[in-house]
Amino acid sequence: MVEKTDDDDTLRSLHERGRVAAEYPRVRALVGAADAAGRRWAGNLLARIGPDAVLAEHPDTPVVSVAFTGHSTVSGLVAPVTAELARHGLLLRPHVSDFDGYVFDLSDTGSELYAAKPDAVVCLLDASVVFDEVPRPWRPDDVARVFDEKLRLLDGLAGVFDGAGRGTLVLNTLPLPREWPAQLVALRDRARLGAVWREANARLLRLMDGHPSLTVLDLDPLLGADLPLRDDRLGVYTHTELSPQAQAAYAGELAGVFRAATGRSKKVLVLDLDNTVWGGVLGDDGIEGIEVSGSYRGEAFRRLQHTARQIVSQGVLLAAVSKNDLEPVREVLGRHPDMTLREDDFVRVVANWRPKHDNLRELAADLNLGVDSFVFADDSPYECGLVTRELPDVAVVALDDEPALHVEKLLRDGWFTVRDVTADDLKRPERYREELDRKDFLGSFSSLDAYLRELDVQVRFADASPDEVARVSQLTLRTNQFNLTTERLQEAEVAERAAAPGSLVLTVRSADRFGDNGVVGAVLAHRDGDALVIDNFLLSCRVFARGIEQACLSALLAHAREQGLSAARAGYRPSAKNGKVRDFYPANGFVPVDPDGAPDGSPVLFRHDLADITAPPEHVRLTLSLGGLHQ
């Protein structure tokens, strides 16, 4: 019998009292704290309850719609994926296909899979895709031939999905169970089979390069001695080709993909310092006494620093929040000869004796981000528990007194997973450091108007270039606050809109006296008769309140009037994050189409007659290059 944890008991108690749906906001922490057995139990329970029962109690809970298909039985993925999404406050709405239905599902655009319009499609692959079609007896060359045929098939299916699907198609590499090489008595043949298999999996991974809607997850890094690939009884009797443990690990990888696809990837890594970045307590041990290298424990802390720097090099923001005095911390970061991380690697180093959750709130305000963008790692159970209680939207990574495990715990959940890293991502840390300089600059002025005049805001509002399509997609996926309709678009969907007659996909670039901010916003619009329809308006939180949005909207309306249109229409779909822009259109001359509001889930509609267009702010220097609106 599996021993239950206290968190399991609490979730079981909610279940026994019929309160799981009513108290679903508590479920995230309960599932996250459960052990592997408790998480499996929770996944099965939540899958049985289903999303509709929760939505009836908490209608704002975000839902991810996922279609599961494949060559083998895929229903076993539903419970672990449900549990993993619950850990992140998300609900799963699954659509499970029939056994071995993936070819029909993905090739026929009229299939139930396409009709469901899921946010993501998971096509589970395994070795039986190949070995079910090799002759008996077989040789490595037979395997190479069949695998090559399957790769051509998968390439074609991904192409169909690019054109007809929405969201993300997820494939996976095919791990090789030992039963197949073990059937070959010659070591040379086993080596040949291994080479054939690895080369084919490498080709499978490279399919991502040709398909913007495709993600291919590599399962090999998940598998080890303590994680069996297959349970033979389940495989033979039910055609379930992944063991329950492997399904749970794969579900964790899928959760990262789904977070990225729905704009919920984290943006900021916040590290404690004592016994997290270095060994020891700076205030007690002094600069010479902390462990950074030169010992077993010191090398473990160096490994954590290398990992943090690697993550930061790809556009994640790094900050430190520590209970310490600031000057000794700065001395360590600036002068300790063995430190990998330096103060310039951090967008902000906060060292004081205040509660860490208060420091995290202020840091979020300084960066103009929500705390739900933060991952906080600390070795203190007390600090982790306090942040979890006070800021439940912060992802807390609980480290402990074994630094050799710090890296594995930090990376386990793939908090920062994105589909691609763009050029703008790489510049993000530098730009946020510049933003903090802007805030300090603001403090030297007596009025916001004077600050904005001296800031020298420059904006280029233009048609998106092919190189900017990925960035526009990323803005739709990751921008939550200034996102008028919260529509999420993959790169292929943005490219399709940009190519459509009468359609506009526009980017907003900004710069000022402190530097170039890059692409900070996007507008998607199209012509409908004699009206311009603004499908969405997005702006990075880094550049709020500088008049950029007003300048671009004014220019867009004037452009529509110049193109001979007589009106503009736009919508605002409320979400948990975009309440601050609910009045954006009314404040700029739009009037409600339906003063009584809109039905649940549909946007509130506004109209502008283009007669009286609000002038752009005088302090914004605007450069325009907007395309025509001919249909």
Image (cartoon, helix red, strand yellow):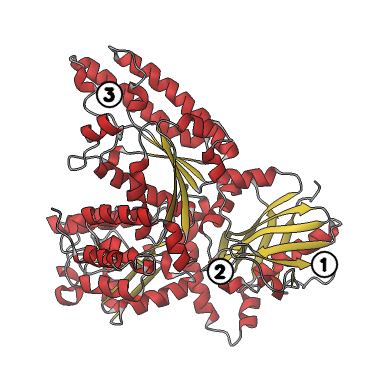
As drawn, which residue projects farthest toward the bottom? 446
Judge the density around disc 1: few (<14), some (14-19), many (≥20) Cα neighbours within 10 Å: some
Q: Position of residue 103 (x, y in %)?
A: 48, 29
- The image quarter containing residue 73 is top left
Q: Which residue is mark 2?
A: 578
Out of 321 and 202, give the one closest to the viewer.
202
Instruction: Tell me the mark number nearer the camera, choosing from 2 and 3.
Output: 2
The residue located at (56%, 56%) in the rendering is 476
Q: Position of 84 compared to 604: left or right?
A: left
Determine the CA span between mark 2 and mark 1: 25 Å
Q: Which residue does the numbered mark 1 point to in the structure image?
A: 609
Left or right: where 490 falls relative to 134: right
User: Is label 2 in a helix, a strand or a loop?
Assistant: loop
Task: Using the rendered image of the protein, determine whether residue 393 is visible from the camera's viewpoint.
Answer: no
The residue tagged 3 is 194
Could one spot residue 487 in this view of the protein?
A: yes
Q: Is residue 219 above or below residue 593?
A: above
The one nearer the camera, 64 or 493, is: 64
- Label 1 is placed on what type of residue? Asp
Q: Residue 393 in the image: state x and y as whole percent.
A: 39, 68
Q: Which of these two is toward me, 81 or 623?
A: 81
Q: Residues within 10 Å of mark 3 (few under 14, many from 20)?
A: some
